[in-house]
Image: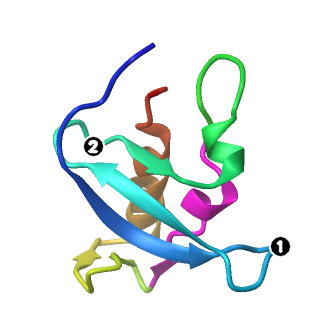
């Protein structure tokens, strides 16, 4: 099993799609760039390569801008580049425990 060390920053906190009042945090390891979520679907995934949960996939991409939870906005020349950033962000995960 891989172990991730380092500092994490919260990219976004999202409400559960199935449980009102329950929130999950999407975090990024500032050293490796890997992204994780604290929802059960993410934590208890089995099998090979880890796939992004629906919370990670919900990162906002609007008007070619990705808005992080801290309010930071990352602008892109095109919507395609913004979508690619989110896809790359969600695919950069490693199995960690």
Does the stretch in magenta take in 78? no
Q: Which residues are magenta?
A: 52-62
Along the line of sight, the residue nearer the viewer: 90 or 37: 37
Identify residue for label 2.
33
Image quadrant assignment for residue 6: top left
Location of residue 88 in the rendering, given as x and y in whole percent from the top left corner: 42, 45
Within 10 angstroms of label 2, few (less than 14), some, or many (20 or more) residues?
some
On screen, residue 69 above or below 6: below
**Under tag 2, what secondary structure?**
loop
On screen, residue 95 above or below 56: above
The chosen color scheme is rainbow
Lateral position of residue 23 relative to residue 65, left or right = right
Q: Quadrant of the N terminus?
A: top left
Q: Kindly identify the residue that appears in the image at 77 percent across and 74 percent down.
A: 17
Identify residue for label 1.
18
User: Is label 2 or label 1 in front?
Assistant: 1
């Amino acid at each position: 099993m891989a172990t991730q060390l380092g500092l994490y920053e919260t990219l976004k906190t999202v409400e559960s799609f199935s449980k009102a009042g329950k929130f999950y945090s999407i975090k990024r390891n500032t050293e490796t760039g890997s992204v994780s979520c604290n929802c059960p679907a993410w934590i208890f995934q089995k099998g090979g390569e880890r796939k992004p949960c629906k919370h990670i996939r919900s990162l906002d991409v609007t008007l070619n801008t990705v808005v992080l939870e801290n309010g930071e906005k990352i602008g892109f020349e095109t919507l395609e580049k913004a979508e690619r950033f989110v896809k790359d962000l969600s695919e950069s995960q490693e199995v960690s425990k």
